Amino acid sequence: MSTNPMEEAPREYRVIGTRPIRHDGIDKVTGRAVYGADVSLPGLLHGSVVRSPHAHARILSIDTSRAAALPGVKAIVTSADLPEVRDREEALGEGSTNPRHLSHNILAHDKVLYHGHAVAAVAATSPHVAAEAAGLIQVEYEVLPPVLDVRAAMADDAPILHADLRTAGGDPKKAGTPSNVAMITEFEIGDVEAGFAAADEIIERTFDTAMVHQGYIEPHNAVAKVDPDGQATVWCSTQGAFDVRHLCAEVLGLPLSKLRVYPAEIGGGFGGKTTIYLEPLAILLARASGHPVKLVMSRSDVLRATGPTSGSHIRVKMGVTRDGTLTAVDASLAYEAGAYPGSPVRMGAMCMASPFAIENQRMVAYDVCVNRPKTAAYRAPGATNAAFACETIVDELARKIGMDPLELRRKNAAHEGTPMVHGPKHRRIGCAELLEAAQRSDHASAPLGNADGPRKRGRGFATGYWFNAGLQSSATISINPDGTASLVTGSPDIGGTRTSCAMMAAEELGLPVELVRPSVADTDSIGLTDVTGGSRVTLATGLAVHDAAQDVKRQLCERAARTWKCAIEEVRFDDGGVDSLVQDGERLSLAELAKGAGRTGGPIVGRATVNAQRNVGSAFGGMMVDVEVDTETGRVDVTRCTVFQDVGKAIHPAYVEGQMQGGAVQGIGWALNEEYVYDDEGHLENDGFLDYRMPVALDLPMIEPVIIEVANPAHPYGVRGVGEVSIVAPPAAIANAIADATGARVESLPMSPPRVLAALHTRP
Amino acid sequence: MSTVFIPPALRRLTGGAERVVVSGATVGDLLDAVDRLHPGVRDALVRDDELAPHVAVSVDDVVAPAGLAEEVTESSEVHFVPPLGGG
């Protein structure tokens, strides 16, 4: 069904913009919501995964005989049970994936490539028997030297992870040489050399950021059953049931129709649940044992063996004139992909300078394999690393020419028609509006005050950009005989999108939102719906809901016309009912039409499918932050924090604020505390939340959200999508605040006390 | 005539040209026209008559869902960009 957003945009809303209680709220606060690990089936077996104790080793042999002999063990699988799959990039999931790499990450074939890499899996009658059996599986390894650091991995003499990997886009003379650099991508607009020649001040620095994890509360899990005819059913915690189906089908060599995936309730994802780990193992074990099988990761498994986001090494050079015009940026970005290619480095490069109108830009992006877990998406993948580097330099340039950093940003703000480094121009965006809101904010004019003794106070600001995604979605609205509605989508709800979608349906149909029941369906019960990611659900699934509601309204008009024996052009849907345009006062409410639907043509069901690529509206976020730095210990405390975001239109403002606050908190953790710590042999030393330090409520002030609404003209309600961009600005904003407080520039994340102290000792 | 912007890595195939102006009704037509002028560009971007999995196309600043079949106008600007995802 076609959508003409501009013509249909209502000016005043009845439901959109309000803050109703979420439909799934009571289930969640009373513990009734069913998560993947809660799923139980008759005859259920429990699985355990054998993981590599080494970061890099060749598998010489796997002996499962002792485990198989243990009473209660029903099945054991290794990579020998996985079919050979194609060794080339395919359009899978959100982007492109090499199915062979995906398969080898599920179960290591000839080599293990990181500490925790899965090697075998076992199913048994209890979790304890399964764990004991896993301990009896003997794997003989030839240990190889690991490479953990992105720069070390790029060296000519680095240990090579994949003997068959060649650098795409690299020097043709090295085309035959194995390398850990999977891809080099260049972007360039304008004349960078001329831009620097026109600059009065130029700063060039290098930055490092640590690998960090999304830190979702709920570990990965999967329950699978396989019927005698080979039909497999999976329940799991995922951001995309259709992606799980597609990826499992690819890895297992099955037709899509042989797989049905139920997305269970999800306890956080942030991008980390957009791929597969346990799901194919559960299917293989269920098929081999003839019983349903459940697998649940421990926190250690999650940290060691699921996808964090990349650590990185970034060089940035920028130039500015004395009047505050940014003239050029030149950057190289090297991101850790983990054990297999596919870091978000290209997206980082494309986002880096997108908040600015800079005519001359060059970025070179390096995707680099290291002996760490294969990275996965994390909120605005790649952008936070890049913004940390770029926004720090912008702040420093402003101070060097004696201009307020926020004013420098406003003067150089990207706007509609500004080209980005990869070529396309911005469409209607709210970057300038955001910066002006920040300048006008109470926070900006509040006195910073002085701290006591060795503590110094500072204020920093930074912006961030994220594309947002469109992709495909489906929605179905069934009108119940009593005039209420059931709304079905295929988008797992990680941010309140059940309710935001129900609000859009209620808005269109003239119903109270409480009378629209939203649910998230399995892959056999709704049309294909891409992953909940890219901040896309309220935008794209919302668009499908909007269009499905138009379908319902059209059918209601047909039913009314049939009842009144008039032409459909002689009726009009308005505010929850259909009016006759030819007989004054004639009106049939939605409830009356629903009650009589059996007599006028049968059930009323609206449906819509969309590819929302053309409807995407990009997002800008910003953070203003006050810090206190203890110059004796290096400890940094965030004392005040305001976050700004152009959301297009806030469908449910409370959930939008929650996304802004959540992203800010994760960004603060990335800035100050979080990092993967490995020993020299590549063993992860902090594989639990006691040692992998995420911020908690006591570490933080109230995060004050400021919503800016610059409507996305390509969406019926002006929605842009809000889930990701809030994480981009925080590390740079905090680094700028530390510099404001102390004069020291910290160039590595996390800005933990030792690094802050080191920067204090080396400041000019 | 539409303008096709050449990614930096492929400019060795176009003698350094950053953009090529050609005629066509779709992205595929434009790419064929560019390839006739500068052989090798199409092979770098296309696999099995579809855009390669690591390539997306932007037409007039919108990532085009139809790929090579995306229709263009006489004044269209075409960029080949990495596909975008998210978290």
Image (tube, coloured by chain):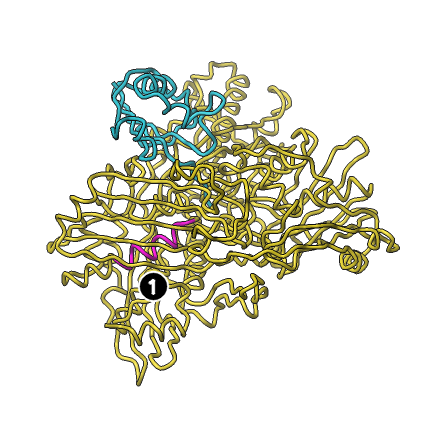
Chain colours: A yellow, B cyan
Q: Position of residue A714 (x, y in %)?
A: 35, 33
Q: Which residues are magenta?
A: A382-393
The residue that appears at 75% across and 45% down in the rendered structure is A77
Residue A606, magenta (yes or no): no
The residue that appears at 44% across and 56% down in the rendered structure is A152
Q: Position of residue B34 (x, y in %)?
A: 32, 20
| Of the pair A747 and A715, the residue shown nearer to us | A747
What's the residue type where badge 1 is placed? Glu
Secondary structure of the residue carrying numbered label 1: loop
Left or right of A96: which side holds A353? left
Chain designation of label 1: A
Is the residue A673 above or below the residue A220 in the image? below
Q: Is residue A642 visible?
A: yes
Left or right of B77: which side holds A649? right
Q: Residues within 10 Å of mark 1 (few under 14, many from 20)?
A: many
Q: Which quarter of the figure has residue A631?
A: bottom left
Q: Which quarter of the figure has residue A423?
A: top left
| Of the pair A276 and A77, the residue shown nearer to us | A77
Which residue matches tag 1?
A747
Q: What secondary structure characterizes most of the magenta part? A: helix
